[in-house]
Image (cartoon, grey):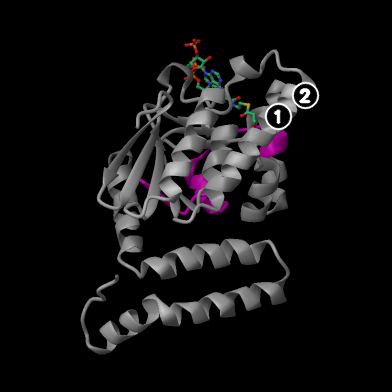
Amino acid sequence: MSYSTFNTKHEGEIAIVTISRPEALNALNNTFFKEFNAYLDTIENDENTNILIITGEGKAFIAGADIAEMQNMTKEEGYQFSKTGQNTFSRLENLNKPVIAAVNGYALGGGCELALACDFRISNNYGKFGLPEVSLGLIPGYGGTQRLSRLSGLGNTLYLQLTGQMIDAEEALRMGIVQKVVDASELMTEALKIAGKITQHGPNAIKTLKKVVRGGYQVDLNKAYDLESDEFSKLFESDGPEGMKAFLEKRKPNWK
Ligand code: CAA
């Protein structure tokens, strides 16, 4: 299936999604959200895809929500616009496979919020991060007010969102927003290398790990420990036996 706001391709079990609206620096509009939800419907049931990489076409990752589309919205439409973004990014965050943001340039406003909903972020040295909504008389509306503070702390969140200023990839790295910065020419090679490392591991263990880390973060600590033990134990009936046997037999696991 093809989409008008992004392109998709596969490298084995890795899916690469390239957001592509270069005329608006890949800004996210209503069509994007419709298409991306349809794509998530497909990908979550696709047993041949075990990991996603999201990047942007050209000099931007995503320059935010589409300002031209938002300009004449009513309060009710604004609410719906925010909810659509929040719900879509929550789906992405809780997708049953890991998602890596490969940030290739501007990741601003809703674009930064999409990157924050990925499991982790790598960036090239042109990466620029910011939540400039206050400069438009708005605030982040796709979960960014909450997600950034959980990732990087209240001080960094209020600093970035009150000033609305952009930071470069190195500063984002220092704030824990980005996990790795590479040269521009290395971005996709590095993203594929990291994705390849993840897909070498037990597929059920990988899915379970994401579910437990994300699920445990939203509940109290004792409930989170229970979730960990429950899910840890289930792996003794899926990937665990082969993984441990392979280690002891000094060979690579043969995951089913
Ligand atoms: N929405 C719609 N169009 C956008 C856009 C956006 N978020 N960002 C850029 N564009 C368009 C520009 O209007 C311009 O279109 P024209 O060629 O038709 O004039 C084109 O993309 C190229 O942009 P610039 O000429 O501005 O490029 P630049 O290199 O000079 O500047 C930039 C790049 C600093 C990223 C600048 O485009 C910019 O500041 N963009 C807006 C960033 C922003 O404020 N994002 C937050 C949006 S609000 C939001 O996201 C709300 C939410 O949380 C729900």
Q: Is 182 drawn above or below residue 2 in the view shown?
A: below
Q: Residue at x 53, y 46 (%)?
A: 92
Tell me how far mark 2 sits from mark 1, CA to CA: 6 Å
Q: Give the residue displayed 50% in from the left and 28% down from the top.
A: 32
Query: For mark 1, does the 10 Å Cα neighbourhood hold few (<14), some (14 to 19), or many (20 or more) residues?
Result: few
State the image coordinates of residue 86 (x, y, percent, origin top left): 64, 40
Q: Is residue 141 visible?
A: no
Q: Which residue is mark 2?
A: 76
**How many dots with numbers?**
2
Residue segment shown in magenta: 160-182
Amino acid type of the residue that numbered disc 1 sits on in the rendered structure = Gln
Q: Which residue is mark 1?
A: 80
Whether tag 2 and tag 1 are in contact, CB under 8 A, the answer is yes
| Residue 87 seen in the current view | yes
Quarter-of-image position of residue 205: bottom left
SS category of the residue bearing label 2: helix
Quadrant of the drawing holding the N terminus: top left
- Residue 214: image quadrant is bottom right
